Image (tube, helix red, strand yellow):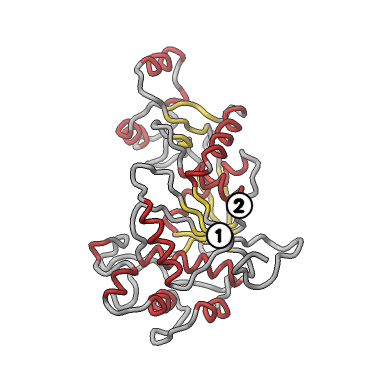
Amino acid sequence: MAPGLRGGLRLSGEPNRTGRFAPSPTGTLHLGNLRTALLAWLYARAQGAPFLLRVEDLDAGRVRPHFETEQLGDLRAIGLDWDGEVVRQSERLDRYAAALAQLDAGGALYPCWCTRAEIREASSAPHGPLTEGHYPGTCRRLTAAQRADREASGRPPALRVDAGAARVAFADRLHGPQEGVVDDFVVRRNDGAFAYNLAVVVDDGAQAVGEVVRGDDLLDSTPRQLWLAQRLGLPAPSFAHVPLVLGGDGARLAKRHGAVTLGDRLELGETGDAVRARLAASVGLADPAERPSAADLVARFDPATFAPPPSGPLPGE
């Protein structure tokens, strides 16, 4: 049994509920990130499943090693543990390259030279089943002469999938039945970096992640990732998209909202245990005056009935 694994080994025929948390070391985790991590951990541990930690450090221009150290320390401080070694995306580039080669061999990729301004302009016009903000397939429809002109410009292209406006349906634990149209999304940026949607699908498949618990701001990206997993022949995980913590103004939590990190709370005299209790209380897993241990929360957490309040500020903020 892996270190830290609670419950028993998964029996043959039982659903795979292996969970993960995958922060990007580009800044300090705020309380919203920590609450999502806590919930992801609880979903896995309450079902006797492994919990994995992956560092999504592909954005070389923004990644800073000290943020990774800080983030891992914050997770430990609120009582979270994980199984096995921490996985870093920067050490898995060969896997992403192999996935691109597989997609290319299957005729699922094409180069795209569009700028962000061109995409905004094109995607805001009526173009069938896709919605504003989705890529409308401009470069997929280029003539041979148009493609030659763009190649001659010297501007490196991104690589996009040819999704054919596929419709993908799935069931989310908290949001119920969902369906979305898959646009021709980027899998390799024009600077050569592998895109998030590609890396996350490859990693979840390689690590045998069975249930993805993450913020509901990523709900709309799920059809893309399920489509990509199918094209790569990878098993599809199940999903639970949990509500975000917002600032008092209704915007996504940020530094301007005050004491929003664990470090901020420690400076105010709180402890890691108190912060964990505060996060648990915000989703109905504890009374405000309680200080439940991490083990207490695992014992009382039922993934089948958990129904958190919608996104909003933490109580008392």
Name the foreground residue: 166 vs 66.
66
- Farthest residue toward the right? 12
Mark toward the start of the polypeptide (2 vs 1): 1
Could you tell me which residue is drawn at 57 percent across and 28 percent down? 104
Could you tell me which residue is drawn at 44 percent across and 76 percent down? 280
**In which image quadrant can residue 216 be found?**
bottom left
Q: CA distance from mark 2 to mark 1?
A: 8 Å
Residue tagged 1:
52
Label 2–label 1 contact, CB within 8 A = yes
Give the secondary structure at mark 2.
Answer: loop
In the rendered image, residue 81, in percent from the top left (x then y), is placed at: 52, 68
264 on left or right of 38: left
Q: Amino acid at mark 1?
A: Leu
Name the foreground residue: 251 vs 59.
59
Give the secondary structure at mark 1.
Answer: strand
Neighbour tally class for label 2: few under 14, some 14-19, many 20 plus, Cα within 10 Å: some
Name the foreground residue: 266 vs 279.
266
In the rendered image, residue 50, in percent from the top left (x then y), is placed at: 61, 64
Residue tagged 2:
207
In which quadrant will I find the C terminus?
A: bottom left
In which quadrant will I find the N terminus?
A: bottom right
In the rendered image, residue 77, in percent from the top left (x then y), is placed at: 42, 71
Neighbour tally class for label 1: few under 14, some 14-19, many 20 plus, Cα within 10 Å: many
- Farthest residue toward the top? 145
Q: Is 279 situated above or below 205? A: below
Q: Amino acid at mark 2?
A: Gln
